[in-house]
Image (spheres, helix red, strand yellow):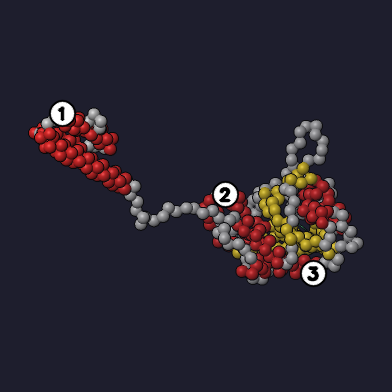
């Protein structure tokens, strides 16, 4: 029985020093497992005299219980320490400022397209669309633009490439949205009240011209539509678009697909690196317009003896520059993030006529 005290001290010390749960399990097996030191001692009880057993039995049982609870206590302590360490490692300062996420913006061209669409929708115009790669027929011939017209010259128009020996007429990148007039009348006949916003292409590059730009076509065909309706619609549009009536200048002009024709300029100034609408003594041309030529109606299968109407083609980028004071058109398409953040719009600012565009 003297050895029992040493045995107890030895096991309790080793348990206290166990580094982790695996070491602890090894100790349990070595002490209390089938061939553990304490278990073997208990097996010796059988060979003792009843008197010896009466003393040794309770002592061994007490030792076994004590070692068992020491193992359990150490196991709990190791678990606590592990949790403690993990909490320390995953420490988080919830008072730190949040990480800033950059939010994208709506490009001024997209914004203005939405504004234009909202205003014309309010006047009863639907939206029509056509392809950006057009045939000569829709882009030119059907619009009464003859083969020798300067607009067809190689330097203005982008032609698609054909393999040598392929003699089919080439396609063009549409130079204006006017081919949508033909496509729409062909498909739906008269009467018509549509706008057609979209991309157009011309070989041209300076402060107010880029090889790709945006137009919105307007087309209204009925039995008695006149230039007066055109003028009213455009003035109504500009007033809604700029939020105030701005000075416009209607100049007599010529387009092969309208007769008579007029171009419209808007009063502006270019001082101090920004363009301002409604002041100064400069004018920026923003659209071409006129009464649809009878040849054009006929090309689209509409009888000019029964129907007539107006058409216009407006530069979307131009009116975006004017409204938002953007002096250089080329910057629109540079994809410079600083520019986009400065001139861009929040995604939720959806334009609507009732709230003012
Ligand atoms: N298509 C012409 C242009 O791009 C604009 C226009 C459209 C003129 C409709 C008259 C009628 O310059």
Q: Is residue 39 above or below residue 338?
A: above
Rate crowding at label 3 as few (under 14), some (14 to 19) or many (20 or more) other CA atoms within 10 Å: few
* Among the two numbered marks 3 and 2 on one chain, the one whose residue lies closer to the N terminus: 3
Q: Where residue 257 appears, x then y in whole percent? A: 82, 56
Q: Measuring 79% from the left and 55% from the top, which residue is drawn there?
A: 184
Q: Position of residue 32 (x, y in %)?
A: 23, 34
Whole-number angstrom distance, CA of label 1 to CA of label 3: 126 Å
Circles 2 and 1: CB distance less than 8 Å? no
Q: Is residue 160 above or below residue 244?
A: above
Element carrying mark 3: helix
> Residue 5 falls in which quadrant of the image?
top left
Q: Position of residue 17 (x, y in %)?
A: 20, 37
What is the distance, in whole Å, between disc 3 and disc 2 at their CAs?
A: 41 Å
Front residue of 300 and 191: 191
Q: Please name the residue that numbered disc 2 is placed on.
A: 335
Residue pointed to by mark 3: 228
Q: Nearer the viewer, mark 2 or mark 1?
A: 1
């Amino acid at each position: 029985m003297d050895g029992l005290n040493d045995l107890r001290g030895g096991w309790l010390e080793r348990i206290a020093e166990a580094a982790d749960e695996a070491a602890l399990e090894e100790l349990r097996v070595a002490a209390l497992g089938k061939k553990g030191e304490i278990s073997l001692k208990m097996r010796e009880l059988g060979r003792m005299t009843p008197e010896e057993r009466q003393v040794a039995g309770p002592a061994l049982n007490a030792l076994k219980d004590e070692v068992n609870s020491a193992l359990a206590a150490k196991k709990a302590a190791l678990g606590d320490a592990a949790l403690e360490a993990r909490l320390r490692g995953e420490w988080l300062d919830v008072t730190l400022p949040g990480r800033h996420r950059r939010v994208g913006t709506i490009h001024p061209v997209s914004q203005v397209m939405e504004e234009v669409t909202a205003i014309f929708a309010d006047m009863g115009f639907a939206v029509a669309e056509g392809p950006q790669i057009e045939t000569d027929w829709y882009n030119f011939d059907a619009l009464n633009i003859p083969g020798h017209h300067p607009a067809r010259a190689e330097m203005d128009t982008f032609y698609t490439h054909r393999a040598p020996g392929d003699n089919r007429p080439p396609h063009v990148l549409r130079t204006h949205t006017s081919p949508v007039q033909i496509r729409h009348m062909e498909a739906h006949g008269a009467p018509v009240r549509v706008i057609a916003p979209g991309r157009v292409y011309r070989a041209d590059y300076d402060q107010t011209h880029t090889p790709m730009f945006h137009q919105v076509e307007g087309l209204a065909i009925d039995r008695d539509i006149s230039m007066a309706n055109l003028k009213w619609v455009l003035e109504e549009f500009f007033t809604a678009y700029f939020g105030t009536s701005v000075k416009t200048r209607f100049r007599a002009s010529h387009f092969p697909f309208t007769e008579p024709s007029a171009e419209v300029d808007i009063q502006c100034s270019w001082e101090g690196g920004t363009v301002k609408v409604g002041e100064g003594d400069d004018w920026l041309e923003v659209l071409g317009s006129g009464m649809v030529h009878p040849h054009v109606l006929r090309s689209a299968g509409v009888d000019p003896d029964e129907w007539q109407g107006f058409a216009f083609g407006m530069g979307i980028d131009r009116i975006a520059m004017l409204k938002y004071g953007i002096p250089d058109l080329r910057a629109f398409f540079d994809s410079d993030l600083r520019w986009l953040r400065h001139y861009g719009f929040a995604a939720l600012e959806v334009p609507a006529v009732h709230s003012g565009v």
